[in-house]
Amino acid sequence: MKRTKLQKALEIAASITGVVALFITAIGYPQIGFVVALFASAMYAIYGYTTKQYGIMVSSLIYGAVEIVGIIRWVFMGANNG
């Protein structure tokens, strides 16, 4: 499969964003980490769609749903509910 420069850049940006989100969450800021991870999941979904890798797209949408639950629990319900 030949990828365009945009697709390659999107893959790299999504990977870096995902790692940054994990690091932010690990150092104790899950409220921010979940939001950053949601952006990474959105980029992975776009990447999966543009490269016709629908498994990546679907799994990233599922991860996005988990991140939305994390955002709701940590941001709107407070840290004691996480």
Image (spheres, rainbow, N blue to C red):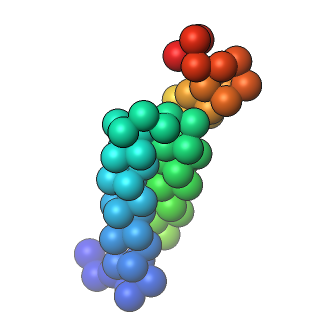
Rendered position, 6 above or below 20? below
Q: How many marks?
A: 0
Residue projecting furthest to the right: 76
At x 50% / y 61%, what residue is drawn? 43
Q: Position of residue 14 (x, y in %)?
A: 41, 62
Q: Seen in the image, is 53 located left or right of residue 1?
A: right
At x 62% / y 32%, what residue is drawn? 71
Residue projecting furthest to the top: 81
Q: Name the residue nearer the viewer: 63 or 76.
A: 76
At x 35% / y 37%, what residue is drawn? 26
Q: Name the residue nearer the viewer: 38 or 24.
A: 24
Residue projecting furthest to the front: 28
Rendered position, 10 above or below 54? below
Q: Position of residue 53 (x, y in %)?
A: 38, 58
**Residue 62 seen:** no
**Residue 68 seen:** yes
Q: Position of residue 1 (x, y in %)?
A: 26, 75
At x 44% / y 83%, what residue is drawn? 6
Q: Name the residue nearer the viewer: 13 or 81.
A: 81
Q: Position of residue 5 (x, y in %)?
A: 38, 88
